[in-house]
Image (cartoon, helix red, strand yellow):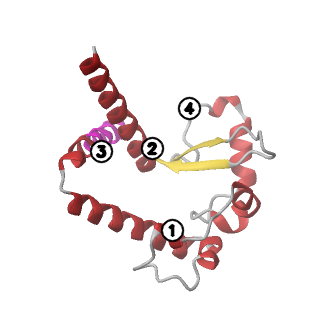
Amino acid sequence: MQLLNQLRFLATVHHVKKVPFWSETRIQALRDRRFRAILRVACERSPFYRKRFAGLNLDKAKLSDLPIVTKGELRDNWNDDVITDRKIQLNDVESFLSHDRNLGQWYRGRYAVCQTSGSQGRPLVIVQDRQCLNVIFALLARSEEHTSELQSRLH
C-alpha cells in the first residue's frame, strides 16, 4: 500500500510539472471540470452546502457567484452539516487529535486531520484525504522548484 501511495504522489508531481506547459484553453477546461466536480460532491454530500448553493446552476456558476462562507460558519455547522463524509463526527476527530499517540497517524486510516490555532476563537478542525494532500504537496514541491530556478537565474 505504501508503494502505491508513493506512486500516486509521484504521478501527481509529474502532472503538476506538466500543466504549466499546457495551453490556456486546456488549463481552463481542467480547472472548470475540477471546480464542477467539487461543487457536485459538496451538494450531494453536505447539507450545509446543499442549502448554500440552492438556486445556483452548478453547471454554469462561477467562483464569484458562490456565497461567502466564514470560518465561524464552518466551525458552527461542521458536525451536522458541513463535512461530506457523514461517518465523521467532530467529537471523534477531536478525541483523535487529543492523543499524542495519534501524531502522524491517519484518522480512520484515510484522513489527515489538524486544526487551526484558534486565535480568533475556537479552532477549526480540518480533515483532508491523501489525494488532497498529494496535490498540496506536489504544488508546494513545484513552487519550491520554481523559486529555486528563479533564485539561480538572479545570481
Q: CA distance from mark 4 to mark 3?
A: 22 Å
Q: Is residue 133 magenta?
A: no
Residue highlighted by disc 2: 133
Task: Give the amino acid type for the residue marked by disc 4 in the picture.
Answer: Gly
Q: Nearer the viewer, mark 2 or mark 4?
A: 2
Residue highlighted by disc 3: 12
Q: CA distance from mark 1 to mark 3?
A: 28 Å
Disc 4 crowd rating (10 Å Cα; few below 14, some 14-19, many 20+) is: few
Tag 1 or tag 4, which sits nearer the N-term?
1
Q: Nearer the viewer, mark 1 or mark 3?
A: 1
Q: CA distance from mark 3 to mark 2?
A: 10 Å
Tag 3 or tag 4, which sits nearer the N-term?
3
Residue lying at the far bottom of the rendered structure = 55
Residue highlighted by disc 1: 64
Q: Which quadrant is the C terminus positioned in?
A: top left
Q: Nearer the viewer, mark 4 or mark 3?
A: 3
Task: Give the amino acid type for the residue marked by disc 2 in the picture.
Answer: Leu
Disc 2 crowd rating (10 Å Cα; few below 14, some 14-19, many 20+) is: some
Q: CA distance from mark 4 to mark 1?
A: 36 Å
| Relative to 110, residue 65 above or below | below
| Relative to 69, residue 118 above or below | above
| Relative to 81, residue 137 above or below | above
Q: CA distance from mark 1 to mark 2?
A: 25 Å
Q: CA distance from mark 2 to mark 4?
A: 13 Å
Residue highlighted by disc 4: 104
Which residue occupies 45% across, 66% down?
38
Magenta segment, principal secondary structure? Answer: helix
Is 75 left, or right, of 9 in this rendering?
right
Which residue occupies 64% across, 78% down?
51
